[in-house]
């Protein structure tokens, strides 16, 4: 179910398969890094395709990936499921944000904390204005409806949502005609009953993913002890 690399080794991509035969990987810890300040008009302004290293430099201002990041980014770009395990604050978000900005479809990011959701969305807005939006209970109904209109219009690359949104029939209907290319579960240990922060709303995430067509899934967590990674993979249908 996972590649268990030696602490000093990188994950082995040979153990991963295309989404039609999904697999999981465990990425290694990486050093932390702040978002670079990039002028808005340089982000996503070229129609020419970028490789991950070029996109990393252009969008985030980093000259190279930290250990484990390139493997996770590659999985997201190649429609492979992955379970990414990295310490808190070590750069997990880049593992899905970069490929989301490189893809031409929608990436849904399920996040349990509105404050974290806001911080991450704001960071993306700074480097790629207009590509990110949020739907959560702390925004007004009108703001959430406007966000979903932008999603349906194809204006958004990253949609951050709280897990309880998947319990709303209206939210499911709003996504019905939208192509979801990548499904990201942040703080994925919340899915696991063995995790230290289990949340019942997260128990619906696997079903929600199936309802929108079972797009490739990236789970991210800093918790990888005992039964948690196996339970995450089971709950998210990561064989």
Image (cartoon, rainbow, N blue to C red):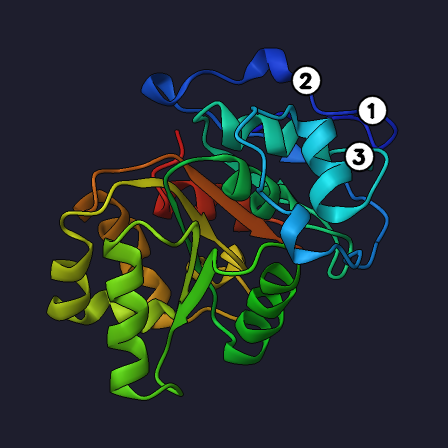
Front position among marks 2 and 3: 3
Residue most extreme to the top: 14
Q: Secondary structure at mark 1?
A: loop
Which residue, given by chain and number where applicable, does mark 1 sit on? 9
Nearer to the camera, 224 or 112: 112
Q: Secondary structure at mark 3?
A: loop
Nearer to the camera, 6 or 59: 59
Q: Secondary structure at mark 2?
A: loop
Q: Is residue 180 left or right of residue 160?
A: left
Circle 3 Cα neighbour tier, 10 Å, few/some/many (<14 / 14–19 / ≥20)? some
Q: Earlier in the sequence, mark 3 or mark 1?
A: 1
Q: Earlier in the sequence, mark 2 or mark 3?
A: 2
Which residue, given by chain and number where applicable, does mark 2 sit on? 12
Which residue, given by chain and number where applicable, does mark 3 sit on? 65
Whether residue 81 is situated above or below residue 133 in the rendered picture:
above
- The answer to whether residue 1 of the structure is visible from this angle is no
**Residue at x 34%, y 38% (from the top left corner):** 237
**Residue at x 32%, y 56% (from the top left corner):** 205
**Residue at x 41%, y 69% (from the top left corner):** 134
Q: Is residue 214 left or right of residue 71?
A: left
**Mark-to-mark CA distance, 2 and 3:** 16 Å
Q: Are marks 3 and 1 in contact (CB under 8 Å)?
A: no
Circle 2 Cα neighbour tier, 10 Å, few/some/many (<14 / 14–19 / ≥20)? some
Q: Are marks 1 and 2 in contact (CB under 8 Å)?
A: yes
Nearer to the camera, 27 or 191: 27
**Mark-to-mark CA distance, 1 and 2:** 9 Å
């Amino acid at each position: 179910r996972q590649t268990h690399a030696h602490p000093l080794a990188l994950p082995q991509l040979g153990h991963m398969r295309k989404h039609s035969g999904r697999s999981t990987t465990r990425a290694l810890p990486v050093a932390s890094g702040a978002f670079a300040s990039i002028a808005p008009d340089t982000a996503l302004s070229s129609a020419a395709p970028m490789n991950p290293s070029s996109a990393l430099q252009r969008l985030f201002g980093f000259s190279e990936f930290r250990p484990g990041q390139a493997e996770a980014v590659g999985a997201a770009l190649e429609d492979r499921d992955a379970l990414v395990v990295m310490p808190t604050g070590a750069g997990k978000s880049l593992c899905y944000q970069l490929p989301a900005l490189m893809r031409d479809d929608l990436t849904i990011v399920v996040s349990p904390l509105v404050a974290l959701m806001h911080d991450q969305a704001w960071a993306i807005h700074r480097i790629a204005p207009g590509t990110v939006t949020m739907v959560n209970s702390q925004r007004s109904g009108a703001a959430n409806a406007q966000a979903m209109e932008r999603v349906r219009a194809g204006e958004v690359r990253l949609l951050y949502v709280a897990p309880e949104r998947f319990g709303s029939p209206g939210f499911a209907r709003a996504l019905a005609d939208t192509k979801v290319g990548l499904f990201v579960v942040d703080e994925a240990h919340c899915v696991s009953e063995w995790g230290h922060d289990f949340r019942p709303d997260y128990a619906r995430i696997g079903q929600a993913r199936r309802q929108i067509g079972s797009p490739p899934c990236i789970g991210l967590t800093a918790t990888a002890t005992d039964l948690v990674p196996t339970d995450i993979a089971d709950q998210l249908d990561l064989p």
